[in-house]
Amino acid sequence: VRVSAEIIDPHSQTTVLSEAADGSDLSSALESIDTVTARLREKLGETVKTIERDSKPLPQVTTANLDALRAYALAQELYAKRDFAQALELYKQATDLDPQFALSWIGQMRVHNAYVDAPAGVAALRRAQEVRSRLAPREAMYLDAWVARFDEPARATDKWLNLAKLYPDYEAAQSNAAIWTFTDNRFNEAIQFATAALVPQNATPSIDYDTLGRAQLAVGDLPAAAKAFDHAISRGYESALRRRAVVDASRRDFASAWNYLAKVPLDDRHGFLERTSVAIDEGKWDQARQYASSGFTLAKKAGGLDSRSFLLPLAVAEWGSGNTEAALGHARAAADQALAAPKASAGVAPVAQDDAEVALAAGLIALRLGDGRVADRVEAELSSDEALASAPSVAEFRSVVKAQKLRIAGKPR
């Protein structure tokens, strides 16, 4: 088996450098790639000492099992298309073939994170941490940034920003920096990072177009957001259909918004968030309640964070329909369940952070309905956890709730 590589001048099409390495049978391929790469790097000006310091053998930082590597590569393609179920199966197949394949454990964690299943994500992440030595320096920093998401959420964004700055040509770093700055409401930064991630070699451009569109939507650039979501949709990213509907709802073009939502599968519980929102925008309260109820039924079946957070659109739909007691009941239940959930999950940090935001949202709804006790209890619980309370999104939401309480108390300043 021969592995060869050429450096070609893009202007003249002249071969500047070429290298090749031979080996017997397919198992030699990874070692040959290392050999060719090292020779090219040396000829391009790197010192042997630098190459040895900054490099590890490819089988060591990925896997020596080519079947595991192929399963991982296919899983990456499926993940980019949001076919999470099939991607997870292939990531698991890769780690069955090589239990020390750290990148594939990280892949499993990413799928569970997409499913909003933090406990399962943490379990996969811990397996990746156990074999951290099997990662190259850049990928080790990538792992550390994900660990911060679960263990030190207040530091997660900074970890991604550091990785993006240190490796500006690493699209995964730019992509995650975009996602986390967006999560922290730093929309203009998110636009910059998402744009930087959209290079030709990006394996998941659909995700970055979706993030770009969300940030552009947040700053009110509707034409740019529509264009970004259209790019994501054309690449098979179904979730972008929901966001594309929001663009047209923001333009008050409800007919077009419903056309996009009609393409969202009815077994996708998250599609009912936008269906509920658009129905509320149009003042169709009975329809909004039906959509909110359908979404909650699916979310309750799935369990986890969504089974609690989906109580909130249900509360808003009941509130708009004039059913104040029903709305309060849903808000109180959401707060109760959200405050109890982190204790049940051994305090997994993202569960705690996400549930803190659900509890604060429930408190805000209850405040608007005339019940300040929910917000008081949520604040009392959160103030006892300094690390959680200092997470940017939690801290900002606490400020909103406190401001609402002061406004109601006749202290608008």
Image (cartoon, rainbow, N blue to C red):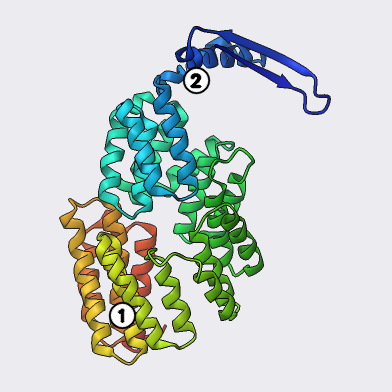
Q: Amino acid at mark 2?
A: Asp
Is residue 12 visible to us here? yes
Q: Nearer the viewer, mark 1 or mark 2?
A: 1
Tell me where residue 101 appears, x and y as whole percent.
35, 28
- Categorize mark 1 by other alpha carbons within 10 Å: few (<14), some (14-19), many (20+): many
Label 1, on which residue? 315
Q: Is residue 184 above or below residue 134?
A: below
Report the number of discs. Answer: 2
Is residue 402 visible to us here? no
Q: Amino acid at mark 1?
A: Ala
Q: Which mark is residue 365?
A: none
Which residue is at a point 19% across and 70% down the rendered structure image? 336
- Distance Cα–Cα, label 1 vs label 2: 54 Å
Are circles 1 and 2 on residues that touch, CB within 8 Å? no
* Horizontal relation, residue 12 to residue 372: left or right: right
Q: Is residue 342 above or below residue 62?
A: below
Of the numbered discs 1 and 2, the one sitting upstream in the chain is: 2
The quarter of the rendered structure image containing the C terminus is bottom left
Front in this rendered view, residue 319 or 46: 319
**Rendering quarter of residue 140:** top left
* Horizontal relation, residue 134 to residue 38: left or right: left
- Callout 2 secondary element: helix
Label 2, on which residue? 54
